[in-house]
Amino acid sequence: MKLWGGRFQDETAGSVNSFNSSLSFDFELYPYDLKGSRVHVKMLARQQIISEDEKEKILTGLDAVENKLDGAREEGKIPWQAEDIHTLIEELLTAEIGSLAGKMHTARSRNDQVALDIRLYLRNQIDEIQLGLVELLELFCELSARHLETILPGFTHLQPAQPVTLAHHLLAHAQRLNRDLERLQDCRGRVNICPLGAGALAATTFNIDRQWVAKKLGFSRPSANSLDTVGARDFLLDFHHCSLSILLNLSSLAEEIIIWNSPEYNFIELDDSVATGSSIMPQKKNPDIAELIRAKTGRISGNYQQLAMVIKGLPLAYNKDLQEDKESLFDSVNTLKQVLKVLPVFLRGIKFNPQKMEEALSRGHLNATELADYLSAQGLPFRQAHQLAGKAVNYALSQNKGLEEMSLTEFKELFPEESEKLKPELIDRLQPLNAIENRTTLGGPAPSRVAEQLNSLKDNLDKNRKK
Ligand code: ARG
């Protein structure tokens, strides 16, 4: 069956039919298409555009159609051919209730219908993805709470820089993902607007009730401009951006896990249940999962580009190009859901190695800033303090020891002019954990501040769970 055969005299070529058809991928949308049709039909009856009896017959017919579609989904095969899911549903409904099925499409076009379907689909998926992110963030909180006092080098340029705590480090990743959660919420707001009633492009002459439909379908409001509504896909682009941001952030996390797992770092060990081996090198224990997550960023980024190129330069209203908005969307949604499912399992399979982390602190003089800060707090201009601390690093290097292992006498001999500024407390200040504990400014790594950060993130997640 075709929804548009009236003016055509000749058959469509087979290759044209198959090239034009989206059924192989938009079949995924059938639950949303049915949901939208049911509400649309109820509205038509409320507005007396169709009769109560017609409404009942259509709704009963749609239940039977749903059974058939569920069956096909379970089988994993689509035993029908049709231009798209909207056409198929009307065709199956016609088989159930005859020509009355044609009334379902009164005051509606596939253009506003498909926009509705993808908005309903995406809203659902965003809710699931948000839940996945919340669960991931809760895991970060759980791990951080255990490591408020585990110390390790913080890096800039991947060079050991200053000591931080593992909790602070993990929460840095969590803060990024928390912003992704907020971004998704913002995106959801723009997805959650009802397109139904926009018709093909110029709305309809029927006395429909768009407010009622929007409310029934859980949307915040009906869209404002019919011409814009049927061609707008920027809400999908927003989603692609959110997905890309999540994957970019996770790719950084994955990269660190890979580095930390290398024998050169040895900061973590992977449980057998989350590691993989090599077919030739028996000694290997590989972080494949982290590598795959890092690589998935590529396809998510590709999907973003794909949609951007589909909508580039499109004239207003619906163009068939928009049929090409779906596969990349489904792929990003499915990829994200897979990643969010495996990542918590993988993270739980990581054993942190605090001893190795602490040992790494003794290489690289990470407390040099601490020494410079101390001297400058004693009244030296910071630039001069920095110079002297550099000199101390040189000296410590020549003695093959850490700054915290130097004695007060050594410091005094090294900086004779400043000797009265050097108090025994300096040696204490240079111990890595003390160096961290003194960094109590807002957002800093001191365990007290990190505990604050952790609590406020947890509160935020609790609110998210309740909404
Ligand atoms: N399969 C189409 C799509 O995904 C549905 C809308 C078709 N509209 C049309 N006027 N041909 O975009």
Image: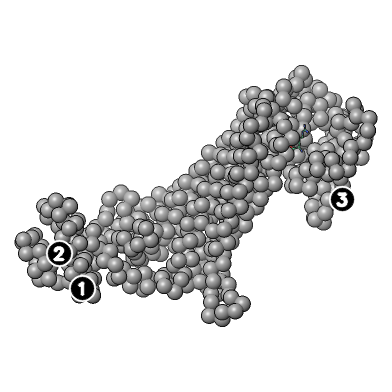
Could you tell me the amino acid type at mark 1? Ser
| Location of residue 123 by image quarter | top right
Q: Nearer the viewer, residue 81 or 191?
A: 81
Q: Residues within 10 Å of mark 1 (few under 14, many from 20)?
A: few
In the rendered view, tell whether residue 462 sits above or below residue 3.
Answer: below
Tell me if I can see residue 196 in this picture: no
Q: Position of residue 40 (x, y in %)?
A: 76, 31
User: Which quadrant is the N terminus positioned in?
Assistant: top right
N-terminal of the pair, mark 1 or mark 2, is: 1
User: Which quadrant is the C terminus positioned in?
Assistant: top right
Q: Nearer the viewer, residue 55 or 352?
A: 352
Q: Nearer the viewer, residue 445 or 336?
A: 336
- Left or right, residue 313 beside residue 41: left
Could you tell me the amino acid type at mark 2? Glu
**Residue at x 44% of width, y 57% of height:** 141
- Left or right, residue 442 beside residue 270: left
**Residue at x 53% of width, y 74% of height:** 285
Q: Nearer the viewer, residue 396 or 441?
A: 396
Identify the mark at residue 425; answer none if there is no mark.
2
Q: Position of residue 101 (x, y in %)?
A: 87, 33
Q: Secondary structure under badge 3?
A: loop
In the rendered view, tell whether residue 301 sits above or below residue 264.
Answer: above
1 or 3: mark nearer the eye: 1
1 or 2: mark nearer the eye: 1
Residue designated by label 3: 79
Could you tell me the amino acid type at mark 3? Pro
Identify the mark at residue 398; answer none if there is no mark.
1
**Residue at x 66% of width, y 46% of height:** 328
Pointers 2 and 3 in contact (C-beta within 8 Å): no
Q: Position of residue 139 (x, y in %)?
A: 49, 59
Q: Residues within 10 Å of mark 2 (few under 14, many from 20)?
A: few
In the rendered view, tell whether residue 149 sits above or below residue 104.
Answer: below
